[in-house]
Amino acid sequence: MDVRQKLKDCGIGITKPRVAILEYLMKQCTHPTVDDIYQALVSEVPTLSRTTVYNVVKLFAEHGLVNTLGIDDRNVCVDGDTTPHGHFFCKECGRIIDVPLTELSAGGFDCDGNMVTEVHLYYKGVCSECMSKRETDESRSPR
């Protein structure tokens, strides 16, 4: 779907920063921070400020266009993929990996008659790439 149409459908005014930020987030799989978004777009939108990015991300989250993730203790990350899924945070490299919800929720979900409007499922640990690197480093080190 066209980014401009998404903004219109949500009743959000179309501005160059909003279009640029949403386009950027729709293409990302890296869960960027506000600062990452700012750094990526400031050359394209020279009038962009970190405050603008923060406010736009907040506006988009309020309208369900993006999700904000509190999985990283130091930064709020932004996810342009609003389909249901979980996240895995690597404590070594800091990478956030999408985890399909079907793998996490086998057996159904019962919430005692309560209406669930959001689910935030976070795992933290060491990713497979960092584990492989650890194993390689350990095999190279003298005993």
Image (cartoon, rainbow, N blue to C red):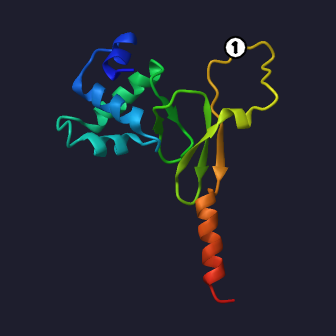
Image quadrant containing the C terminus: bottom right
Location of residue 30 in the rendering, given as x and y in whole percent from the top left corner:
46, 44
On screen, 3 above or below 133?
above
Location of residue 106 in the rendering, given as x and y in whole percent from the top left corner:
78, 32
| Residue at position x 46%, y 27% in the image | 66
Which element is circle 1 on? loop
The number of callouts visible is 1
- The extreme front residue here reads 1
Instruction: Locate residue 59 relative to residue 13 in the image: left or right.
Output: right
On screen, 65 above or below 50?
above
Residue receiving disc 1:
115
- Taking depth in this image into account, of 136 and 66 the one nearest to the observer is 136
The three-letter code of the residue at mark 1 reads: Met
Location of residue 35 in the rendering, given as x and y in whole percent from the top left corner:
35, 44
| Residue at position x 35%, y 17% in the image | 7
Image quadrant containing the N terminus: top left
Instruction: Locate residue 122 relative to residue 66 in the image: left or right.
Output: right
Q: Quadrant of residue 83?
A: top right
| Residue at position x 59%, y 56% in the image | 91
Q: In which quarter of the image is residue 11?
A: top left
- The extreme bottom residue here reads 142
Location of residue 57 in the rendering, given as x and y in whole percent from the top left corner:
39, 29
- Taking depth in this image into account, of 104 and 53 the one nearest to the observer is 104
Instruction: Locate residue 72 relative to residue 124 in the image: left or right.
Output: left
**Crowding at mark 1 (Cα within 10 Å: few <14, some 14-19, many 20+):** few
| Residue at position x 67%, y 33% in the image | 101
- The extreme left residue here reads 46
